[in-house]
Image (cartoon, rainbow, N blue to C red):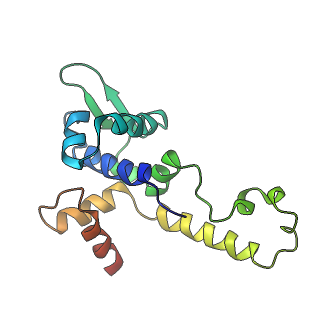
Amino acid sequence: MKVNTKVRYGLRSILQIADNYGGDPVPISTISESQEISNKYLEQVVGTLRKSGLILSRKGVRGGYTLARDPEDINLWEVITALDNQTVLVDCVDDPQVCDRSDDCLTRSIWTLLSRRMQEFWQSFTLADLLKTMREAGDMKLQQLSDLEKNLEKS
């Protein structure tokens, strides 16, 4: 599985929205500026997150985006699958009919197991987990998720 730009930007955006959970909605212009994502592309990303039910939008002067649920109740797999429908490593994992050899393929079981383990891994982290790690790391900007990755690898 290759994490595409939409997933990376979507995760950064929803983390910023989650960081303000319980407060005022986060304007798209604020996310765009702090995450260095073009407004036009960001509108597509947050639109997808909104349609999936992960975030809510409020229009008007004090408008913006808020989480639809508590950060503890949103796992990373939900964010990833909302933004990318290609989450399996090999097409035959979800659709055995795409390959004539899927019934007796020696490697299909490995791809299936690995896909399942990846899903379990991503489901094991919530937005709250990432926010906690970020806060423990200090005053960190959300676009610098490489440091966060290092902290997650230690745990």
Residue at image x 24%, y 41%?
Answer: 32
Residue 76 located left or right of residue 81: left
Task: Say above or below: 26 vs 146.
Answer: above
Residue 49 located left or right of residue 64: right
Q: Could you tell me which quadrant the C terminus lies in?
A: bottom left
**Quick one: 5 or 77, which is closer to the camera?**
5
Q: Position of residue 39 (x, y in %)?
A: 29, 35
**Quick one: 22 or 84, which is closer to the camera?**
84
Q: Could you tell me which quadrant the N terminus lies in?
A: bottom right
Residue at image x 49%, y 61%?
Answer: 123
Numbered disc total: 0
Q: Is residue 68 visible?
A: no
Residue 136 located left or right of residue 2: left
Residue at image x 23%, y 62%?
Answer: 144
Q: Position of residue 48 (x, y in %)?
A: 46, 37
Q: Position of residue 93 (x, y in %)?
A: 72, 63
Task: Say above or below: 59 vs 151.
Answer: above
Residue sitting farthest toward the top = 60
Residue at image x 43%, y 39%?
Answer: 49
Q: Position of residue 25 (x, y in %)?
A: 23, 33
Q: Is residue 101 visible?
A: yes
